[in-house]
Amino acid sequence: METKEMICILCPLGCKMQVQEKPGKPGELRVRGQQCKLGNEYAYDEFTNPTRTVTSTVVIHNAPLPRLPVKTDKPIPKEMVSPAVDEIAKVEVNGPVKIGTVIIKDLLGTDANVVATRSL
Ligand code: SF4
């Protein structure tokens, strides 16, 4: 049975965990190495549907800085991160922009918006 190694990122302890599916019980996981129950939840999510919040920047015109920091307002599927970064890189905006402004709505159909993380 395949064992996946993963590090829980939910707190600074960063427990190194070993996760494997229980033999004959698809969808049920055996998790080792976690120091609290949050590790179980993280391992299950990471094993079945890994997601990431994407942070990046876009070009901004008419502003004191050349790039505006942005992020997705919710995590997106891990396999969508690379296309999402490419899509965000195409965007240019004009200042001023307020923190929280939606820069891209429903990024690549993920239901996540890309929002400004500072005013500029
Ligand atoms: S398993 Fe618990 S203690 Fe370990 S890193 Fe995750 S949240 Fe922190």
Image (cartoon, grey):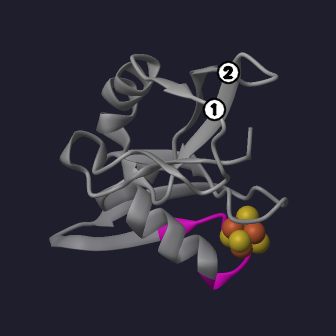
Instruction: Give the structural element (helix, strand or loop) at label 2.
Output: loop
Which label sits on residue 95?
Answer: 1
> Image quadrant of residue 95?
top right
Asked if the residues shown at circle 2 and circle 1 are in contact, with their CB atoms under 8 angstroms apart, the answer is: yes
- Residue at 63 percent across and 42 percent down: it is 97
Amino acid found under the numbered disc labelled 2 = Asn
Name the image quarter holding the C terminus. Answer: top right
The residue identified by callout 2 is: 62
- Name the residue at 73% across, 25% down: 63
Indicate which quadrant contains ligand 1: bottom right
Counting from the top left corner in percent of width and height, residue 20 is at 38, 58
Q: CA distance from mark 2 to mark 1?
A: 5 Å
Left or right of 112 on screen, residue 18: right
Vertical position of residue 37 compared to residue 80: above or below: below
Front residue (pair 94, 76): 94
- Residue 1, labelled with which disc? none
**Circle nearer the N terminus (2, 1):** 2
Q: Amino acid at mark 1?
A: Gly
Looking at the image, which is closer to me, 32 or 40? 40
Q: Is residue 39 magenta?
A: no
**Residue at coordinates 42% horizontally, 23% vertically from top-left?**
91
Residue 117: x, y in percent?
A: 67, 48
Asked where in the image residue 86 lies, by quadrant, the reply is top left
Q: Is 64 placed left or right of 22 in the picture? A: right
Residue name at image x 44 percent, y 56 percent:
75
Range covered by the magenta-colored residues: 31-37
Q: Residues within 10 Å of mark 1 (few under 14, many from 20)?
A: some
